[in-house]
């Protein structure tokens, strides 16, 4: 990086500390590229690139945060001053002082997403040709609309803090979606989608997108399933078993395990916007979140996911740990400042160290507690066919169309693209417009089957919204096939 | 007015685009944003952002490409280099199967009537002091959280089609605070909005809380059994549901592609109740009005639904080109939607006195669309929701889910308030872009389906 800019940042950090700042960090983003290419019915409707760079500075003063950001790198000094001034103003209204806990040893480190071929070294022509090739495969007379898109992201970020850390990160992400739509027997639109996924291993450059197993080979399947949907009946209201494929399971986990287990949410810092959590500090070590079959990890130690990023925006390394152990709630998604406050409030040491979940989406956003990879561990109930074989009356569902969750994540309602009816251990027919709803704790305690490793996939999330100012974050969810009992499905 | 240097730089870039024989829309967006967050009775974040974006859209025949970059627009070279990236993208793209419409700026627009320098430069200490006053006056025994976003948005663009330019500057603020009982867990909320500093009054929020607190303190929560109820939607709930209804019912793209709940209808058909009127009115002062859209088209009052009858569908330039329709001035992030007021008493409790048992749901959380083409939506109650009997508040209600469709909820409206308020629907996901809707303070809807209720608030 530019040595002059580095020196300016380090000098300013020292200056802020000299003015009694308790902690200071800065994120210099030298390049943040994104590219979005979308074909809709064969038309290249989106052909966009975005480039951002700038600096964001966070200052802790007398137990309060101040933050300032600018896209004008000639104003780094002013940015530090404004951040400190904002912290000073904030410190006039503090009832719970924020601290970063015990001073940590400065880290000199770097992280780079594993990628063989930088997607920004692939020409636009090649990208369009690749997507066009799949689009041609999706084309049929009876298909009303087709959609295929890819998003490429590359970010180079330098982190500095007043503890002496200097961490460089080079992050690469690739997301892609294909969908086909058609009019059903009532003249209403139905849709089948496939999203680029990973198995957690391998690399996440251009090579991931062009791996047929992960993306292009699914074109035929989504068409076949749409064809069945268009002549299907609607799911009727009733209680039955619900089997979630990973294409739906990741969102279930995201909304009803990931979000309620963000520590800032548990502590009430998101109440006015995203909402709170039914989980309290008293719940850890006591709350039976789910059945014994439910074990949930954070990060998961797998390299190929948008939720794997090396070091968080507090400078803490990502950690791999269990949040739910055989149904029992034991930990959650944490950052340095939040664990100190939580332990103090609880009067016991619930959290030993930061979970490495402090993240910001851009240089102009302050870090907050976010998901990394939130994963349900594979079980030993076999493959999908084994789980179906043990089901008397149920549905298998895939891919979300709608999700609505209570403000404390205590209840939910999901709509899916497709359901397969299961009767007496066999898939019988396709049903359209499936929905299911439930109450979180009751639902996870009704988990009776968890698929094995062969059913486990990492769903890639390109846009999880949280915080004010809002931040749309990239993350991942490793999820196997899951079966729940006695679930309310369909609409009355 | 736009800074003369920026204007000159854009004129040079426009000349370059003409020289390259491409159509271009060159746009400047600057935001000065400030946001203060409150959590656990403390300022949890106090953030300032000054961000400038350059957006360039290029069309060459039936090909197009666009490029955005953030950073100071300091020279013609900076903009021309970005223009070259967009041109290169357009050249390497595919032909569309329709001919894009030309973006002609219909006048020299310069709009600043909703700009307040005092709000643009609002001292964060004013926000901190206001929160402090509210917390100390209402009572520190409660837990408070909230956010207060304020700032200015400046927008300027030119196109290659003529020498006109369009300029708009606006200031906006959105204040909210949530009061939560530390043991009983219910939540009360107060929101204020506007484009001037003086639109905010701490006393207003204090009065609201002081009026509601005795009701909440004195009653336990009520669990609503699933079934059909007379539901009084408050202004936020009306705006949130109506926004979804508009998105999935009144935009050309969803309508033409048969994804809209109105797709089986045509102008003149009855789609909602006879007391529902929806208009896009950029002159309405409750909204943040744009007199032009981002293609340069003049924005006029536009009827969407009158007395329940479908009147118009909004077409942006791309959808208009695809479906051979006329663009309606809707290349814009947020329209100025006005939901027509009615004749109901300004006092909600007086208005529902003769209606027996009703549920008052002022706001809905996380609305989504299980079946958009049938108009089915779902969302759960939040903030200040209560059970009312014969005009008297009986109890706050636990988190209750509505799953119903637009046609039924807005087809069975018994009464609409005669008073309207501004609902600020801005979010801060991307660039600053203030959006607001004018909505009645309440709407009494009959036979609304409550499909679930939690055991807590």
Image (spheres, helix red, strand yellow):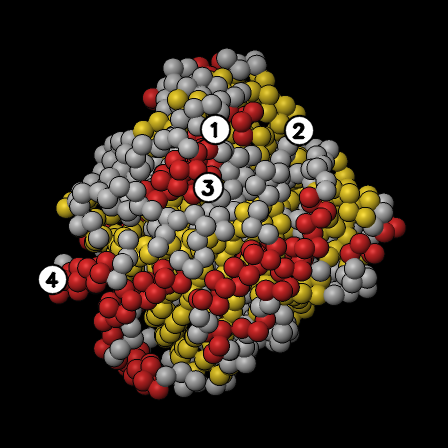
Q: How many residues crowd around disc 2 within 10 Å: few (fewer than 14), some, or many (20 or more)?
A: some
Q: Residue A3 carries which label?
A: 4
Residue B352 position in % (x across, y down): 82, 52
Q: What element carries label 2?
A: loop
Circle on res. A283: 1
How many numbered marks does the figure carry?
4
Q: Residue at x 40, y 26 (%)?
A: A330
Q: Report the Cα–Cα distance between label 3 and label 1.
A: 12 Å
Residue at the image point whose x is 40% and y is 70% from the top: B32
Q: Nearer the viewer, residue B372 or B259?
A: B372
The one of A468 and B305 positioned closer to us in this rendering = A468
Q: In this image, A25 relative to B246: left or right?
A: left
Is label 3 in contact with label 2 (beta carbons under 8 Å)? no
Gap between marks 2 and 4 measured at Cα: 65 Å
Image: B224 above or below B153 = above
Whether marks 3 and 2 lie on the same chain: yes
Pointer 2 residue = A237
Structural distance between the alpha carbons of marks 1 and 4: 48 Å
Chain letter of mark 3 equals A
Name the residue that disc number 3 marks.
Answer: A267
- The numbered mark, 2 or 4, whose residue comes first in the sequence reads 4
Residue B415 picture location, percent across and down: 80, 56
Nearer to the camera, B395 or A454: B395
Residue at image location 25% in from the left, 79% down from the top: B75
Q: Which of marks 3 and 2 is in front?
A: 3
Q: Which residue occupies the extreme left position in the image?
A: A3
């Amino acid at each position: 990086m530019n040595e002059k800019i580095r020196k300016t940042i380090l000098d300013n950090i020292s200056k802020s500390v000299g003015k009694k700042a308790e902690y200071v960090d800065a994120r210099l983003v030298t390049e943040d590229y994104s590219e979005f290419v979308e074909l809709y019915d064969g038309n290249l409707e989106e052909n966009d690139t975005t480039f951002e760079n700038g600096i964001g500075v966070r200052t802790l003063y007398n137990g309060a945060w101040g933050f300032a950001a600018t896209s004008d790198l000639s104003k780094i000094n002013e940015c530090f001053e404004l951040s400190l001034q904002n912290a000073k103003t904030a410190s006039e209204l503090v009832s719970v002082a924020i601290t970063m806990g015990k001073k940590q040893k400065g880290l000199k480190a770097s992280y780079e997403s594993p990628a063989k071929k930088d997607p920004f070294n692939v020409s636009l022509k090649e990208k369009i040709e690749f997507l066009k090739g799949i689009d041609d495969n999706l084309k049929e007379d009876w298909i009303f609309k087709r959609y295929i898109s890819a998003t490429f992201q590359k970010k180079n970020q330098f982190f500095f803090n007043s503890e002496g850390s200097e961490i460089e990160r080079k992050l690469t992400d690739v997301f892609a979606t294909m969908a086909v739509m058609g009019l059903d027997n009532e003249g209403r639109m139905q849709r089948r989608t496939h999203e680029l996924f990973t198995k957690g291993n391998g690399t996440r450059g251009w090579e991931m997108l062009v791996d047929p197993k992960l993306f292009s080979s699914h074109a035929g399947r989504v068409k076949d399933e749409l064809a069945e949907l268009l002549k299907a009946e609607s799911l009727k209201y009733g209680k039955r078993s619900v089997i979630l494929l990973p294409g739906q399971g990741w969102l279930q986990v995201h909304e009803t395990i990931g979000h309620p287990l963000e520590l800032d949410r548990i502590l009430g810092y998101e109440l006015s916007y995203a909402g709170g959590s039914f989980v309290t500090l008293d719940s850890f070590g006591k709350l039976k979140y789910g059945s014994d079959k439910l074990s949930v990890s954070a990060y998961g130690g797998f390299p190929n996911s948008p939720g794997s990023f090396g070091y968080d925006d507090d400078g803490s390394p990502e950690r791999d740990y269990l949040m739910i152990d055989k149904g029992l709630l034991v930990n959650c998604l944490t950052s340095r400042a939040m664990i100190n406050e939580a332990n103090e409030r609880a009067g016991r040491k619930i959290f030993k160290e930061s979970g490495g979940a402090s993240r910001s989406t851009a240089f102009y956003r302050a870090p907050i507690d976010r998901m990394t990879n939130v994963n349900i561990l594979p079980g030993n109930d076999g493959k999908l066919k084994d789980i179906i074989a043990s089901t008397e009356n149920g549905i298998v569902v895939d891919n979300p169309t709608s999700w609505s969750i209570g403000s404390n994540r205590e209840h939910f309602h999901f709509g899916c693209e497709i359901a397969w009816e299961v009767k007496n251990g066999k898939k019988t027919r396709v049903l359209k417009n499936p929905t299911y709803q439930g109450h979180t704790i009751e639902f996870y305690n009704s988990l009776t089957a968890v698929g094995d490793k062969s059913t486990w996939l990492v769903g890639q999330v390109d846009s999880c919204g949280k915080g004010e100012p809002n931040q749309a974050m990239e993350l991942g969810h490793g999820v196997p096939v899951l079966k729940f009992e006695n679930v309310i499905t369909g609409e009355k | 007015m736009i800074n003369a240097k920026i204007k000159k730089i854009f004129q040079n870039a426009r000349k370059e685009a003409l020289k390259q024989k491409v159509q271009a829309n060159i746009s400047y967006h600057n935001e000065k944003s400030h946001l203060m967050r409150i959590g656990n009775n403390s300022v949890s974040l106090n953030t300032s952002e000054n961000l400038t974006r350059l957006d360039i859209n290029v069309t060459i025949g039936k090909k197009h490409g666009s490029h955005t970059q953030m950073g100071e627009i300091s020279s013609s070279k900076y903009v021309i280099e970005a223009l070259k990236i967009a041109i290169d993208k357009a050249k390497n793209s595919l032909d569309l199967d329709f001919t894009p419409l030309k973006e002609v700026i219909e006048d020299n627009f310069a709009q600043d009537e909703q700009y307040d320098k005092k709000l643009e430069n609002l001292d964060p200490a004013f926000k901190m002091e206001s929160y402090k006053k509210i917390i100390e006056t209402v009572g520190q025994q409660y837990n408070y959280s909230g956010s207060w976003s304020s700032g200015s948005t400046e927008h300027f663009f030119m196109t290659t089609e003529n020498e006109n330019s369009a300029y708009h500057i606006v200031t906006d603020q959105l204040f909210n605070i949530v009061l939560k009982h530390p043991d009983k867990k219910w939540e009360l909320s107060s929101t204020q909005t506007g484009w001037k500093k003086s639109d905010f009054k701490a006393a207003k929020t204090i009065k609201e809380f002081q009026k509601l607190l005795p009701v909440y303190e004195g009653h336990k929560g009520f669990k609503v059994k699933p079934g059909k109820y007379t539901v009084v939607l408050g202004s936020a709930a009306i705006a949130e549901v109506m926004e979804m209804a508009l998105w999935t019912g009144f935009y050309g793209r969803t309508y033409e592609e048969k994804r809209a709940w109105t797709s089986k209808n045509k102008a003149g058909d009855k789609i909602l109740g006879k007391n529902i009127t929806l208009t896009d009115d950029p002159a309405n002062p409750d909204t943040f009005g744009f007199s032009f859209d981002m293609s340069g088209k003049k924005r006029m009052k536009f009827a969407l639904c009158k007395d329940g009858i479908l009147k118009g569908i909004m077409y942006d330039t791309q959808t208009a080109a695809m479906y051979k329709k006329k663009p309606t001035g809707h290349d814009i992030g947020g329209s100025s939607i006005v939901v027509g007021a009615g004749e109901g008493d300004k006092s909600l409790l007086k208005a529902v006195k003769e209606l027996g048992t009703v549920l008052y749901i002022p706001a809905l959380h996380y609305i989504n669309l299980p079946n958009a083409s049938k108009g089915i939506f779902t969302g759960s109650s939040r903030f200040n929701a209560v059970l009312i009997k014969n005009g008297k508040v009986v109890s706050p209600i636990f988190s209750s889910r509505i799953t119903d469709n637009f046609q039924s909820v807005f087809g069975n409206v018994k009464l609409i308030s005669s008073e309207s308020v501004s609902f600020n629907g801005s979010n801060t996901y991307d660039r600053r872009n203030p959006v607001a809707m004018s909505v009645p303070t309440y709407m009494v809807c009959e036979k609304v389906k409550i499909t679930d209720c939690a055991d807590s608030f």
